[in-house]
Amino acid sequence: MKNLKGKIPMNRILIVAGLLCLPLDSMLAQSSNDWPGFVEDDRPPPRYEDGRINFGAPLGETGYWSRRTQNIVVNPDNYQNISTQIAPIHIDDVPLQDWARALTNYRAGETYLRSEPYARCKPAPGPRQIMTPYGFEIVDIPELQRIYIVTVSNAMTWRIIYMDGREHPQDLLPTYFGHSIGHWEGDVLVVDTVGLNEKSWTTRDGLPTTDQVHLVERYSRPNYSNLVYEVTTDDPGAYTAPWTSGYVIGWNENEELFEYICQENNVSPEGMIGDGRISNIVP
């Protein structure tokens, strides 16, 4: 098994970024081992008896998913820019409206740490949930026709994906996780989410969304060790067009999630008040 993390050449990044200009179906047709962070593994993905992909551990085993890359876009102005250079799309290629681009620059370059809802234990929806630092599990319960995404860090929360064929309600009250419905397209789990509020960020990069946002996420497990995550953001309140990005998530074999209480583990004062004042409270 060969771990490619941290060894992705720039030409490979440009290839992946170019794929984001293609229709989603064309993008999915590309070999997933071209994605930054992909690990070669000859073992096939586990499956349930009915043939569905198992996004969890096989029976009798343990494991969970955690990020290999850091952000959904490359933003050189981000204070974390060293760790974001393997993201598959550049911030300049995200079709932000003028006000949304100005807000992104303000969050990322000037006050990123002060304005991060994640540091205040706010639930993280969409790709921000999948980017959680201490991992997550995807729990498929066919008897309930639901899939749960359970996270450790931040607010130690879960998201429900309804798999019973229902539609989105017409009178949704916006919430942190919104309303998610899913279906299978072959081996790909497709999740459609609406009804998100504006109290949290859907990305770690501070890209804004409005209550008009519509997320379409695609989860695939091409082999045992990789979860390929793709998300299309359609928000006419903040963007001039829908756009797609994603990343590869790694499998932590023979490990389990642990209890994490955000309010007791928030040891990031710079994440609450900003690094400009950190010298006043930390020796």
Image (cartoon, rainbow, N blue to C red):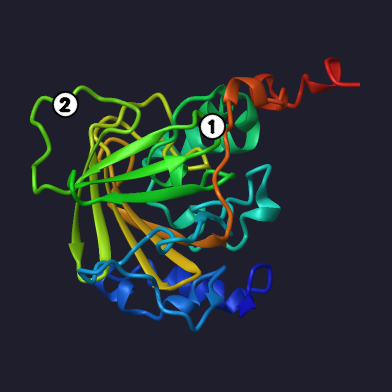
Which quarter of the picture shows residue 271? top right
Name the amino acid, label 2: Leu
Please rate how many residues cluster around mark 2, counting C-alpha atoms within 10 Å: few if below 14, some from 14 to 19, many from 20. few
Instruction: Name the residue rendered at 34%, 38% in the picture.
Output: 159
- Taking the spot 46% from the left edge, 72% from the top edge, the residue there is 224
253 relative position to 30: left or right: right
- Of the two numbered discs 1 and 2 in the rendering, the one whose residue sits closer to the viewer: 1
Is 10 left or right of 209, judged from the image as shown?
right
Q: Is residue 196 depicted above or below 30 in this figure?
A: above
Q: Is mark 1 on a helix, strand or loop?
A: loop
Query: Looking at the picture, does residue 14 appear above or below residue 103?
Result: below
Q: Which residue lies furthest to the top in this view?
A: 280
**In the image shown, does 72 or 37 lie closer to the viewer?**
37
Instruction: Name the residue at the right extreme.
Output: 283
| Nearer to me, 116 or 260 | 260
Residue at left offset 83%, top offset 16%: 281
Q: Which residue is drawn at 35% across and 28% down?
A: 176
Label placed on residue 172: 2
Looking at marks 1 and 2 on the same chain, the residue that comes earlier in the sequence is marked by 1
- Residue 152 position, x and y percent, is 52, 38
For the C terminus, which image quadrant?
top right
Q: In this view, does 209 lie to the left or right of 170?
A: right
Rendered location of residue 28, percent (x, y): 32, 73
- Please tell me whether mark 2 sits on a helix, a strand or a loop: loop
